[in-house]
Amino acid sequence: MGKRRDSWGQSSSPLSLQARLAKHSLRGVSEQLARQVVTAYADYRPQAAIAKSVAISRRMVQRILEATQGPPELGGLWQERRLLYVGSESMETARRKLAKAFPQVRAELSPGESGVDGQVQQAVYAQLIGRAAQCLLREIMERVQRMPSTQKVRVALAFGRTIAAVVAELGAYAEAHPLRDQLQGRVRFLAMVGHTLSYPEWGANTLVSRAAQQLGGEYRVMPTPAFVKKLPVRQGLMEDVEPVREALRELRESQIVVTSLSPIRLRDASTGRIYPATLESEGFIAGRRVDLLIQAGAVGEICGWPFDAAGKRVLTASGEDRYPNPIGIGLEGLQEIARDRSAIAVVGADPLRVALRAALLGGFISVLCTDVETAQRLVLDSRRR
């Protein structure tokens, strides 16, 4: 009878760490360095970043990772990283596994590792934005061709730099599309939220105007502030002001939504960096209000609507000293669109993964545009729970 094999295909008495390094012609690599490499990899650090931090080549990082599968000293770390073992899976494999983990979501993946710094990260981000713009244009064209010529495709846009980047790319892809003339007068862009005082160039009202100009369509702004601190004022605007009521009604009828998301003040375990909530960093709410959201269990937000790790809406006491209430269709409206239409989320940074997983569980997303590494990690996270 042959030796019993464990889940890694190794014998039940695996070689020690030093023996495995020697077996792979890595006698010059110390156990301390090998532990550093595997520990960083288990903490989701990209291989390029690991190589830079320990002053070795990326190929050497790969060789160490190949050699260090199986030793009892490092088994626990490798068990967590099995899905992401050296040499990224193909995008098709990652897409298939993500579809199995989240059957209600279609993935549009771009290559690369979203956590790498510098020029590599910029290139990966550019590919992601391009993929998202292509995805959006395809969704629009499919509906234009299906719908009667008297009807318009309604596309709701969120705010933020990621959505602004997608809108900027959309015009270039539309210009090159062979059926571009069919878009003229057939698309109507709607702002998901109102005016933002910080970074108005990324505001939803600005972005719908740009998108309409690029595709020869129409647009509708949300004629309110994005955030209203007092609940009675918010309710009055939504119920008593006719232009606001009409804008919300049309939003609920959108065929396509394009948004991103943000964590609620996240600490990246691999780098120690603190990622504040977008709402906090861009001056929409004060830090003490973010503390209240965290206490209530919030892990992320979409257009200012907070949700917890299970994808449930986070409820906090309303009032001026608490959380400002965004005007819009809310998470419930987003869920409804994701169920039977298209809710596209563009997310490409690894620290957003916890919030992204929660949004997928909450049913706020039906089309996910992300990079292949983030997709793989989402699958890994789903298997560990």
Image: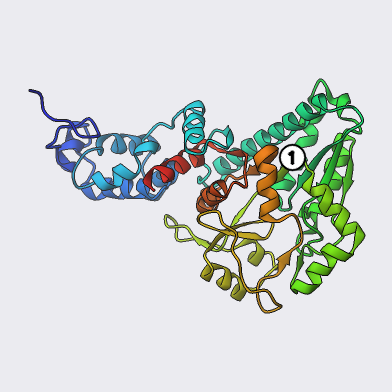
Figure label count: 1
Q: Residue at the left extreme?
A: 1
Q: Position of residue 175 (x, y in %)?
A: 82, 28
Q: Residue at x 80, y 48 (%)?
A: 251
Q: Is residue 352 above or below residue 229?
A: above
Q: Image quadrant of residue 245?
A: bottom right
Q: Nearer the viewer, residue 26 or 295?
A: 295
Q: Residue at the top extreme?
A: 178
Q: Is residue 119 left or right of residue 14?
A: right
Q: Residue at x 49, y 29 (%)?
A: 96
Q: Is residue 292 above or below residue 360?
A: below
Q: Nearer the viewer, residue 109 or 38?
A: 109
Local packing at callout 1 (Cα closer than 10 Å; few below 14, some 14-19, many 20+) is many
Q: Residue at x 53, y 35 (%)?
A: 103
Q: Image quadrant of residue 262?
A: bottom right
Q: Position of residue 151 (x, y in %)?
A: 88, 33
Q: Is residue 18 left or right of residue 205?
A: left
Residue annotated with mark 1: 256
Q: Quadrant of the N terminus?
A: top left
Q: Nearer the viewer, residue 25 or 163?
A: 163
Q: Position of residue 254 (x, y in %)?
A: 78, 43
Q: Nearer the viewer, residue 231 or 186?
A: 231
Q: Position of residue 53 (x, y in %)?
A: 40, 50
Q: Residue at the bottom extreme?
A: 321
